[in-house]
C-alpha cells in the first residue's frame, strides 16, 4: 500500500527545524514541549496516533477499493 500524508520534504523540514536552535519554529516546539503537562502530551500523542492510524487506514482502503471501480 502507498504511504499517505507524510512525504520526504516534510520529514526534511522537520529535521532541519530540530537541528537549528536559532529557528523560530524550534522555539515554538520547545516551548510547547516544556510548557504542557506530561499527561496532556500523552493524550495528544495517543489521539494523534489513533486518528492517524484510523483515518490513514480509511484513505488506504479507499485507494485500494477505488482501483476496482
Image (cartoon, helix red, strand yellow):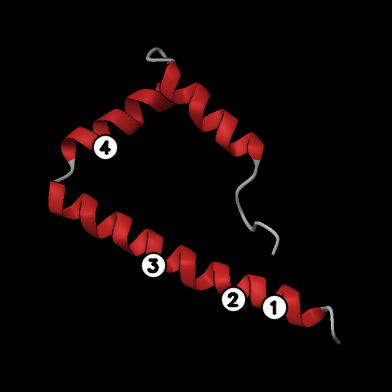
- Tag 2, which secondary structure? helix
Say if mark 3 contacts mark 4, CB within 8 Å.
no
Which residue corresponds to mark 1?
62
Neighbours of disc 4 within 10 Å: few (<14), some (14-19), many (20+): few
Give the alpha-carbon distance from disc 3 to disc 4, as whole Å. Answer: 21 Å
Screen quadrant of the N terminus: bottom right
List x then y, in percent, for residue 35: 17, 37
Which residue corresponds to mark 4?
32
**Closer to the N terminus: mark 4 or mark 2?**
4
* Quadrant hosting residue 67: bottom right
Neighbours of disc 3 within 10 Å: few (<14), some (14-19), many (20+): few
- Select label 3 or label 4 by which is in front: 3
Above/below status of 27 relative to 6: above
Residue displayed at 38% across by 24% down: 26
List x then y, in percent, for residue 28: 34, 30
Above/below status of 50 relative to 8: below
**Closer to the N terminus: mark 3 or mark 2?**
3
Say if mark 2 contacts mark 1, CB within 8 Å.
yes
* Quadrant hosting residue 10: top right
Give the alpha-carbon distance from disc 3 to disc 2, as whole Å. Answer: 12 Å
Farthest front residue in view? 1
**Closer to the N terminus: mark 3 or mark 1?**
3
Residue displayed at 44% across by 18% down: 19
Label placed on residue 50: 3
| In the displayed structure image, the side of residue 15 where residue 46 appears, left or right | left
Farthest bottom residue in view? 69
Label placed on residue 58: 2
- Tag 4, which secondary structure? helix
Amino acid at each position: 500500500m502507498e504511504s499517505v500524508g507524510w512525504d520526504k520534504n516534510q520529514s526534511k523540514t522537520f529535521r532541519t527545524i530540530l537541528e537549528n536552535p536559532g529557528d523560530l519554529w524550534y522555539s515554538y516546539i520547545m516551548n510547547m514541549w516544556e510548557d504542557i503537562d506530561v499527561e496532556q502530551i500523552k493524550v495528544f500523542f495517543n489521539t494523534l496516533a489513533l486518528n492517524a492510524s484510523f483515518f490513514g487506514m480509511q484513505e488506504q482502503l479507499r485507494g485500494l477499493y477505488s482501483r476496482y471501480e
